[in-house]
Amino acid sequence: MDLLNTLVDKGLRRELPTRGEALAVLATSDDELLDVVAAAGKVRRHWFGRRVKLNYLVNLKSGLCPEDCSYCSQRLGSQAGILKYTWLKPDDASKAAAAGLAGGAKRVCLVASGRGPTDRDVDRVSQTIKAIKDQNEGVEVCACLGLLSDGQAERLREAGADAYNHNLNTSESTYGDITTTHTYADRVDTVHKAHAAGLSACSGLIAGMGERDEDLVDVVFSLRELDPDSVPVNFLIPFEGTPLAKEWNLTPQRCLRILAMVRFVCPDVEVRIAGGREVHLRTLQPLALHLANSIFLGDYLTSEGQAGKADLEMIADAGFEVEGAGEVTLPEHRAAAQGGGCGSPAGGGCGSEEGEDAAGRGAREAAGCGAHEAAGCGSHGEAGCGAHEGGGVCGSAPAQAPAPVSGSEPRTDLVAVRRRGAGTDLAPNA
């Protein structure tokens, strides 16, 4: 397919695809699926080889959130029967993290429900970060605490945090349909605060909430413009007791197309398969490793994942290898920037002049990441070759509206509430 050859070429040069090209990936047929996976796999291997980074979640505070995010089992008014507990003590959180690290994880993600942390909460998390780092040499720590106030990102960085996660989740135009207690702009602001503080920004999306293909492309292009170092791709877990409990819109094939599209738009960032992997990809999980270079090990915040041992076996059987603690995840041009991407004070990163090779400069000048003035990352107006009326691919007729996605049958048997690990007396799954 000419489309896939074009996307591979752009991905190897870090050049931004057009919206029409990204939409075309989502519109490919099941007969073309393996070709799509193979093409995106070339881009993934070029930047990340066959390494798979393992991450481990620790839910520091579960449930009782005042926000009304429709997808979340911890939301205000949720009837989902999840674990509810207040802040874990630093030693308890460190013990939970140690289980994941023993299973092969190199990054620990510390998450707490709520709109955002108080200054006292930042103190708590800072103590937890110190406890984890004191007991585990070389571990990466990412915090995910909600919306940040001025100065909080800097305090987390000083405490030893390496990264901060705050997802955009969906497109700006549909954000108000999902959440009303904060705005899309609030989320963008927090990602900017993390960048400015020198933290590696982690920001991603949730697919399967009833969105259109255009919404998926919009949010991924917006992420490209924000330039996080890692992009988690969540697939909605339709928890009973939440407003989106009936949204079973994903098939394994659909999930693979979404991951491929993300890889083509964000070729040199850590693409992580996050929540919902087991629920929606199911037996096609190994194919997803050809697209993403990072997964979560074991359980999630409020739901169970497959056994950690099964994750490790899946990686080995698919011909991949677990990324070691001493290996650098990001490509050299990103690692050298230490999280300072497009538009950040640190400079460097995707599309910067310093340390950029000729191919990277050529991609930038042709409207790749970093072309802020005329056709910035993800801009709609002048996004380079292929930005024709209707978003068509080069030489094609205007793109047609995509057909509705065929939803998969509900698999409520695969949605299990987490009853072990952090916040319980039972051993974690790692």
Image (cartoon, rainbow, N blue to C red):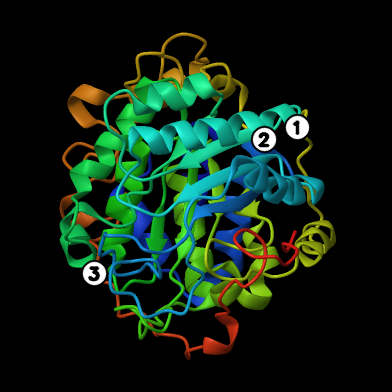
Report whether residue 416 is seen: yes
* Drawn side of residue 79 relative to residue 280, left or right: left
Residue at 49% x, 36% y is 124
Q: Is residue 114 above or below residue 362?
A: below
Q: Could you tell me if the residues under marks 2 and 3 are in contact, i.e. CB atoms within 8 Å?
A: no
| Marks 1 and 3, how far apart at CA | 56 Å
Which badge, 2 or 3, comes first in the chain's sequence? 2
Front: mark 1 or 3: 1
Q: Could you tell me if the residues under marks 2 and 1 are in contact, i.e. CB atoms within 8 Å?
A: yes
Report whether residue 395 is seen: no
* Drawn side of residue 404 relative to residue 43, left or right: left
The residue lying toward the viewer, choosing from 126 and 324, is 126
Residue type at mark 3: give it. Answer: Gln
Which badge, 1 or 3, comes first in the chain's sequence? 1
Disc 2 residue crowd, few under 14, some 14–19, many 20+, Cα 10 Å: many
| Marks 2 and 3, how far apart at CA | 51 Å
* Drawn side of residue 137 relative to residue 75, left or right: right
Q: Which mark is residue 135?
A: 1
Q: Residue 376: x, y in percent?
A: 25, 31
**Label 3 sits on residue:** 400
Residue type at mark 1: give it. Answer: Gln
**Label 2 sits on residue:** 132
Locate the C terminus and report the quarter of the image it occupies.
bottom right
Disc 3 residue crowd, few under 14, some 14–19, many 20+, Cα 10 Å: few
Q: Is residue 324 above or below residue 307?
A: above
Q: Residue 151: x, y in percent?
A: 32, 23
Residue type at mark 2: give it. Answer: Ile
Identify the secondary structure beneath mark 3: loop
| Marks 2 and 1, how far apart at CA | 5 Å
Identify the secondary structure beneath mark 2: helix
Identify the secondary structure beneath mark 1: helix
